[in-house]
């Protein structure tokens, strides 16, 4: 992107899976779009935190890695030629005539509508309070997995009880010499089928469940751990031989500049009308994990549906006198294709 100032119809803030699908939906309705993200590559958390993490609940894909899903979504939107502003954070959103002026780095875009698809906003890992852990980070302690091949043949300790911990235990069990999962209780906060498969692997001796324990310390030298110390509820300790520690305790997120957009917020989420994903500010819509309404399910497929709802609401807003003869893509095809 070289133009410092340009006009388009929709600005999509966030280049994660939901933002990319919103670009496709806009294109299907004949609307031009620019996709803006603070990261210098598309994919959002999927691209930054777990590109090789398998995803099991995308319709039509029994299993697809996050980076492959991002690539397919970008390919799907490509016929409509969305413009991308990557590596640039939106720092200002200002009313401009019947639309908005979006400031992103050294670029200013004038648009008629805005879709906020920023996930949970800016994010970073929640670090366990272990003495000396910083000396091992990026060497033998990791908060994300970019390439599972890096863990082939290694003794891996995973700490946590959510989806990331369970999903990576399932995936790394295929390549690691040993996988141990440390959690403070026998019940996991993961998809039921994933938890069932984890217990199945544990029953077969493929994965060891270290329960009920929590992290207590690490030993090693020169950035390489050799032991993870865990402690049960009564103070009893176990020493787990380990090459790698993967603490998955969720992300610390912040809305950043989005909090200054004047939108109605609740618990760091943007409140929207579920029928249109319209926010409290006319012309601004929010989709994906960042938006909230009664009965909201935090799933990628829910975000995809919200992208379609927002795009159609915007088309009606921008072109109230133009009849829209909606057709399924099976009969219409891709207009730009």
Image (cartoon, rainbow, N blue to C red):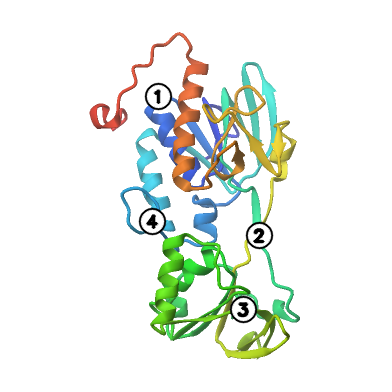
- Spatial CA span between label 4 and label 3: 36 Å
Query: Circle 3 sits in a helix, a strand or a loop, which is it?
Result: loop
Q: Quadrant of the C terminus?
A: top left
Query: Circle 2 sits in a helix, a strand or a loop, which is it?
Result: strand
Mark number displayed over residue 85: none
- Spatial CA span between label 2 and label 4: 23 Å
**Residue under label 2:** 124
User: Residue 309 at what x, y percent from top left?
Assistant: 47, 29
Q: Is residue 62 above or below residue 289?
A: below
- Mark 3 vs mark 1, foreground winner is 3
Circle 4 Cα neighbour tier, 10 Å, few/some/many (<14 / 14–19 / ≥20): some
Task: Name the N-terminal-most of marks 3 and 1.
Answer: 1
User: Residue 321 at what x, y percent from top left?
Assistant: 45, 8
Res 45 → quadrant: bottom right
Query: Circle 1 sits in a helix, a strand or a loop, which is it?
Result: loop
Circle 1 Cα neighbour tier, 10 Å, few/some/many (<14 / 14–19 / ≥20): some
Mark number displayed over residue 68: 4
User: Residue 95 at what x, y percent from top left?
Assistant: 69, 23
Furthest toward the left, the residue is: 331
Measuring 41% from the left and 82% from the top, which residue is drawn there? 206
Task: Name the N-terminal-most of marks 2 and 1.
Answer: 1
The answer to whether 54 appears left or right of 286 in the picture is: left
Task: Name the N-terminal-most of marks 4 and 3.
Answer: 4
Proximity of marks 2 and 3: CB atoms separated by less than 8 Å: no
**Residue under label 1:** 30
**Residue under label 3:** 212
Res 141 → quadrant: bottom right
């Amino acid at each position: 992107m070289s133009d410092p100032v340009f006009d388009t119809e929709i600005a999509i803030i966030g280049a994660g899976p939901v933002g990319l699908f919103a670009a496709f939906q806009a294109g299907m309705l004949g609307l031009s779009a620019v996709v803006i993200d603070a990261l210098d590559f598309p994919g959002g958390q999927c691209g930054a935190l777990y590109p090789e993490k398998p995803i099991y609940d995308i319709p039509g894909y029994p299993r697809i890695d996050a980076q492959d899903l991002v690539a397919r979504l970008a390919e799907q939107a490509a016929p409509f030629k969305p413009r991308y502003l990557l590596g640039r954070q939106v720092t200002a959103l200002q009313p401009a005539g019947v639309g908005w002026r979006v400031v992103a780095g050294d670029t200013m875009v004038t648009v008629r509508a805005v879709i906020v698809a920023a996930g949970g906003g800016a994010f970073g890992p929640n670090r366990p309070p272990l003495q000396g852990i910083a000396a091992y980070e990026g060497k033998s302690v990791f908060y994300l997995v970019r390439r599972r091949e890096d863990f082939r043949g290694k003794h891996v300790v995973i700490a946590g009880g959510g989806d990331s911990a369970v999903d990576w235990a399932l995936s790394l069990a295929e390549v690691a010499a040993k996988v141990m999962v440390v959690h403070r209780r026998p019940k996991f906060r993961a998809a039921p089928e994933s938890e069932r498969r984890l217990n199945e692997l544990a029953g077969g001796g493929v994965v060891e469940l270290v329960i009920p324990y929590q992290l207590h310390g690490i030993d090693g030298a020169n950035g390489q751990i050799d032991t993870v110390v865990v402690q049960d509820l009564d103070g009893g300790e176990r020493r787990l031989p380990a090459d790698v520690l993967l603490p998955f305790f969720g992300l610390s997120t912040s809305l950043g500049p989005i909090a200054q957009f004047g939108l109605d917020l609740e618990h760091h989420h943007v409140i929207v009308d579920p029928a249109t994903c319209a926010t409290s500010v006319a012309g601004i819509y929010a989709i994906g994990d960042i938006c909230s309404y009664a009965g909201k399910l935090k799933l990628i497929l829910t975000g995809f549906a919200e992208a379609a709802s927002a795009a159609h609401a915007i088309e009606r807003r921008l072109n109230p006198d133009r009849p829209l003869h909606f057709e399924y893509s099976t009969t219409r095809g891709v207009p730009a294709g």
